[in-house]
Image (cartoon, coloured by chain):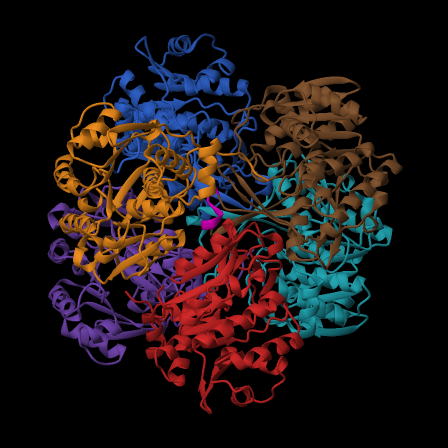
Chain colours: A orange, B purple, C blue, D cyan, E red, F brown
Amino acid sequence: MSEDDLVAFGETMLRLSPPGNERIESADEFEVRAGGAESNVAIAAQRLGLSATWLSKVPETPLGRRAVGELRKAGIETDVVWSHRGRQGTYYLERAGEPRGANVIYDRENTAVSTAKARELDLERIKSASVFFTTGITPALSSTLRDTTASLIKAAQTGGTTTAVDFNYRRKLWSPEEAKETMTHLFPGIDLLVIAARDARTVLGIEGDPRQLAHRLGSEYDLDTVVVTRGAEGAVGWHDGVVHEQPAYETDTVSKVGTGDAFTGAFIARRLDGDDVSTALEYAAATAALKRTIPGDIALVTEDEIEAVVREGGETLSR
Amino acid sequence: MSEDDLVAFGETMLRLSPPGNERIESADEFEVRAGGAESNVAIAAQRLGLSATWLSKVPETPLGRRAVGELRKAGIETDVVWSHRGRQGTYYLERAGEPRGANVIYDRENTAVSTAKARELDLERIKSASVFFTTGITPALSSTLRDTTASLIKAAQTGGTTTAVDFNYRRKLWSPEEAKETMTHLFPGIDLLVIAARDARTVLGIEGDPRQLAHRLGSEYDLDTVVVTRGAEGAVGWHDGVVHEQPAYETDTVSKVGTGDAFTGAFIARRLDGDDVSTALEYAAATAALKRTIPGDIALVTEDEIEAVVREGGETLSR
Amino acid sequence: MSEDDLVAFGETMLRLSPPGNERIESADEFEVRAGGAESNVAIAAQRLGLSATWLSKVPETPLGRRAVGELRKAGIETDVVWSHRGRQGTYYLERAGEPRGANVIYDRENTAVSTAKARELDLERIKSASVFFTTGITPALSSTLRDTTASLIKAAQTGGTTTAVDFNYRRKLWSPEEAKETMTHLFPGIDLLVIAARDARTVLGIEGDPRQLAHRLGSEYDLDTVVVTRGAEGAVGWHDGVVHEQPAYETDTVSKVGTGDAFTGAFIARRLDGDDVSTALEYAAATAALKRTIPGDIALVTEDEIEAVVREGGETLSR
Amino acid sequence: MSEDDLVAFGETMLRLSPPGNERIESADEFEVRAGGAESNVAIAAQRLGLSATWLSKVPETPLGRRAVGELRKAGIETDVVWSHRGRQGTYYLERAGEPRGANVIYDRENTAVSTAKARELDLERIKSASVFFTTGITPALSSTLRDTTASLIKAAQTGGTTTAVDFNYRRKLWSPEEAKETMTHLFPGIDLLVIAARDARTVLGIEGDPRQLAHRLGSEYDLDTVVVTRGAEGAVGWHDGVVHEQPAYETDTVSKVGTGDAFTGAFIARRLDGDDVSTALEYAAATAALKRTIPGDIALVTEDEIEAVVREGGETLSR
Amino acid sequence: MSEDDLVAFGETMLRLSPPGNERIESADEFEVRAGGAESNVAIAAQRLGLSATWLSKVPETPLGRRAVGELRKAGIETDVVWSHRGRQGTYYLERAGEPRGANVIYDRENTAVSTAKARELDLERIKSASVFFTTGITPALSSTLRDTTASLIKAAQTGGTTTAVDFNYRRKLWSPEEAKETMTHLFPGIDLLVIAARDARTVLGIEGDPRQLAHRLGSEYDLDTVVVTRGAEGAVGWHDGVVHEQPAYETDTVSKVGTGDAFTGAFIARRLDGDDVSTALEYAAATAALKRTIPGDIALVTEDEIEAVVREGGETLSR
Amino acid sequence: MSEDDLVAFGETMLRLSPPGNERIESADEFEVRAGGAESNVAIAAQRLGLSATWLSKVPETPLGRRAVGELRKAGIETDVVWSHRGRQGTYYLERAGEPRGANVIYDRENTAVSTAKARELDLERIKSASVFFTTGITPALSSTLRDTTASLIKAAQTGGTTTAVDFNYRRKLWSPEEAKETMTHLFPGIDLLVIAARDARTVLGIEGDPRQLAHRLGSEYDLDTVVVTRGAEGAVGWHDGVVHEQPAYETDTVSKVGTGDAFTGAFIARRLDGDDVSTALEYAAATAALKRTIPGDIALVTEDEIEAVVREGGETLSR
């Protein structure tokens, strides 16, 4: 078996959305796409040159195959337990500008992945990888997945695999209290934590500006690296006690969904490639900016495009 | 409150299907339509002149509103308990010719309607209607709905409302044994039973050709009227000990789904209008034939079109 | 018959528009939607909790059924005289940014509704409603409708029904002089007048800033309430000699068409609900803002969304 | 001015049709195409090598330009009086298999073309052409067009231009009696008459099988050439007292509309090219067969394709 | 490196086709799909359980990535030399019923793959696989590919890998004489030859009925196994001097393209699985039949579906 | 033969682009449009009232007919050598906002037009026209076209036809050095030169602000008129030693492609109509602004719309 640079574990949903800014209540068609934080990260990392594999449990149905196929098309490997029980998770996205704002309706209960046990998954693959990645969404999906997430992180540690987690608090899945308790139990096994400033404050109850948040998170939880994200205001990276600030690029945004995942995937890829935190943040911001010009959750970008953004902030019509 | 000619109770799902004969596993868009046996019947009946209302429990979400909106667009009234719990049922339809055959994937567990109790619904509306209609799908959806179905039929009887039920056995929902036990308990409260010959044989264990099936069902269960349907081979109606045969019309079929519902809705409408069984069967067959020329589950037909089929078997390009 | 909160009378057209910003002259498909000022207002009012019915005369054709079906789908009741004579009105909308600007091509001559006489319509429904609504478009469509509009307003007065009219001057339908003469004859029967500042100036010849316009209109024509609208600059409400100003919300505009109708429908609904003019204007502005994020003429909004805008100016991606 | 082989005069409508077999009453989009018997004929003739020009009067609107553009795209010249009055004719086509049958809803009253007077049109162009073509639809559209049609036929005669007319009776436009009176007045100026057997019987009251119909029409009205068409049963041509029969080719029909026009255009083209009636009928049948495989009203065929059908009845997948 | 069951080498094109039966000359959109005989075969084989990899040389452009992504989505591995020179091959498909017939326009000159040399490709992968597959299309694309094909077959032989070739004569690529000379030079290295009866006759000049063709080909060229295909009339398999006949299943055909590839892929998969020729032919015919119900070139089928066809000839609507 | 106001010579490509901002690598459909600098200019000029003809050599295939048909639909005449050799040029356009930027992938090698020799083309048509137009793209396509371009310019001079050339440097086609050498050899035959400031600097090596560039180009190369364009910053016109500046209009841009061509076409049309340089530049800027509101390469505008922009900078929703 080839050793992966990155193994990610989590749920990928089918995303159903009316065209343009149509409302679901009057829609006569839905666009179908796949998206999930962990596979989004894996794809972004693969686009920057990593070999990446997504682990999951998926129903053996056309809907499950549809989700997996799109990940493969995007370029990553998939290592999937095909299940005869459990649904394929879906979510409905209604796009809208202000003051309406986009709306997400989750329909992800009783999914196949929510029953995934560590013993069903290829732990050796995780142990032999360079990085294992998951998010705070995974343990929020079921108590089974809470255990599984902990076991996978433990397996990674056993194998000497770096562990990276995006905190990704979802208020439609659990309360801040539940999230805090579960996630802080996982922190001792985590090397790299990515977290939104908002989540650090409202879920973990940490105060301060983003630089302070990063520093306090890193110190308090004894993490190797912390990245605090602030959306359009950029991100802050903390490592070895040093804080780096990275502004966000201006973009003609087509779709915000997946921006953070593109950021995280690129950051991991460049770090694994040997970049320092500051350079990795720059590539992460460029990848995130490109993602925003692309419909769907997935960062279908190329290294050349990322390099061009880092170099010159993108270019105009090329012919 | 205006009195309805027909009140129907049941679930209406959103139907998601790839365009044309595309496979779900490679689909990039789904057509969105609404469909459910009971609302299909109500709409067909309304198209033939009845005032018809669909009772149900629906999630207070854009998906729920989407389903209800399509029924209202088609012309019927909707009297809905809006729920903050429970999903909107969906089903995925993959169209295909032979030898592949169309495939239906239900995603209808834990729906709002599956929790509907009789006391939430407008029983007075049922009692004051001329006909109450439901199908064998409803009690198959949950044990709550088993009780609710029985209660609604009882309410109808109390009010002197004629009760009509389409047996509609769905093997993806329950076993023949479960279906037989539940449905035969309901039979004493049913005036009109519509049943596929195949279901009469494999679920109820009744033998014979369709004429015999109709006769035996009517006699054994003391029903007022029995219609045994045979798809492309037509139908048989039994009433007062007399059997009437009705062949099916030839059609250029675009969509089979909903054919039986169109048939049943038209039969009920014409019977209520005073037609004898034989004439009602003729209109039912014509309505079913027109339905097959129309995409989706719903019989968007007009009385003029039905009359034209009965009169002359349809017409060619009219300009 | 149930008593309606709002009864609206007018024409609803089919709206045909090329996708995106395509030109009609090169279009290979048209989106089909329904829209008409009066039904738009009725739907907005229904969305805020009123029971609302649209009265009209519509051709008994698939085109007529198409228009009526969309109104029913949006949630209102329709009470329609089905006609065997007269066309279904259509309009072609070509969307475009500056400096081209959107273009509307009316094809609404010789329609069924243009022949509607008061005696064909359900005057009792108007008399028993709380509010009767129409616009200055209706009497512009034919001399028959000029008489009918006057009769309906008179019927409303007879029944003690509040009368509300949106002035809505359309220069492609009649001259300012014709409009002024007809509309000022109707004013004595009108309780609530909504009018664009521009129309007050160019059609009625009233001078001043919007506050002055509202005051002068209210005084001169002895109206109960006057709302003067100014598009992106907000609106002014006058009642009992007091003037209230309401700014417009900032929006990511997808479609301007129907903004004023959403405003008016919400204003009527909140007034009927007991809000003072100032609060009603706030909800009206919020509903108008939401409408601008939605394609088509119709404000497919929910009360929750309107409340959210009033409370916080909308929210961002919610998941 | 270059001399045309064929000049055709008539109305071209925009054709709006829901996709597939959808019903208009539930359609959310219409395909937009152009079609008119006379321009259809001109295009078919052009496809077989003639230079062809379509004369008409068209509104100076995007809708008018849309119609004309499609004719130009198909390859013919257009010589149009651009009008500031009068509508663009449209028709709505609802496709359907049996027993529903396709339905056409005309919306072609008060069009620009219905006001076209002979003096507005380029009579010299007609006089210098080889063939002038129109149909029985044109004089059915208005009394003005009745006169105009007569004048154009007269002009053609004056110029020594062959006159060809497709009888094309449309019952939604006029009664058989009106049609008979108008058309028989035109017959003395007509060289080539194409007529459906059904029209010959029900409008002109001529009896007999198609051979007899052709012979009687030719003799009674002193025509040079008569073609009697019978749809799927082929056609009969009469010239110089001799009758030729031509069967129709079997086809996988996608759209019947325009079949007859393709037939007529090809017949005229081949006759002008010097073919005898029998050969011209064969090419006409082949062109008609190809048309039926093509969506829309217009025969977008090539000479190579027609030759292939004549030679071998078409071919299978070519790669 | 994992050992593959099947390694295929060849070109995969982007296929551009107007929707439905539209003509290219009036098309405003093209559907985009990927297709190539060798990857089609690999996918069909993978669908029956083989691990399959497609080898090729592809331009490093969005078009190249588009083609490769679709193959990965369908489930196979891709092992691609990314090239900075050479085009991505495309073909335009115009679908049509009789008598028009579908038309393919190749635009596949100067492609990246046409420059692929054996030394660029992973010969070890071929040597360690169970089966190596290519078609007669590959050597027809360039003289470079003629050499490369010979080298790859030789490499396979060296590794003890079974070699399978579909003759697939394309008259738009080379003459019968060229094809015969090139292909018969390759025959000594081929174990399994699949060939259309028509190609055996017109290119190789062998006479007889399909049984005789299979026998003569097998004997004359000393092949291990020969399959002679006859489209709708089924196929004949020859092995060890014994001939097996297999009829084709009846189908509701949506797309013929790729039928033969589905057949060949399934045949190889079942043979490798240990089936005798007769059983393998049965599964091949079932897979081919299912393919015909699916749009595009690729057989997106499941083993369950294939089993169902073999068992019962498919099933009807399942719910 | 009628004399043309404008004859343009060059290549028109089919343009294939994914919908919206989709990436080519994940696209399942391409929009199909035609575009080429010379035909774009001819159409813009025709829209302002010129009679315009596009000369070219096009493959006798559905793809070639598709391209030509769209030009005819837009209103110009086409005078085409139909070729049995050579491809139809295509280009793939991937739209994107910043920082990604739109991307053009040319697939235009070995086209039919690249083999066009002067003797194949209608030189008399050029000689009798008022203006002959081509661009710097044409000689960049092949050495044959380099000669042909020179010959056509010479023919124009012989006939006393004004010659106009847009420099249009394309770095994906040739190097600055090649472009400079070829183009400066053509300059002595050119009356009107349109050139981007950027091209003047990087290809021709001329320094200075746009006013200086215009002046130096005009003087150095002895041109009659020079227009230096600067995109969003407007343009500068030089004639008779006098320089005129023209700012660009603000626009809601839908598509930039073709903006310069619309500008140039309008400038030529107004100059030919007798406008002075300054007025012609104003109309050119207005036409360019309108183009940017229209999808595709072609300026489907009307004179009324251009006049409105010149007069008032466009207008808002008109109904």
Looking at the image, residue F208 lies above or below residue F52: above
Which of the 4 quarters of the picture holds residue B132? bottom left
Q: Position of residue C255 (x, y in %)?
A: 44, 32
Looking at the image, residue F190 lies above or below residue B46: above
Residue name at image x 79 percent, y 27 percent? F221
Q: Please, which residue is most extreme toward the right here?
A: F158
Residue C110 visible here: yes
Which of the 4 quarters of the picture holds residue C26? top right
Give E138 or B265, whichever is nearer the viewer: E138
Which of the 4 quarters of the picture holds residue E252? bottom left
Residue E130 counted in the magenta span: no
- Residue F214 is left or right of residue E41, and the answer is right
- Residue C31 is left or right of residue D276, and the answer is left
Residues drawn in magenta: F20-26
Quarter of the rendering occupied by the C terminus of chain B? bottom right
- Residue D19 is left or right of residue D214, and the answer is left
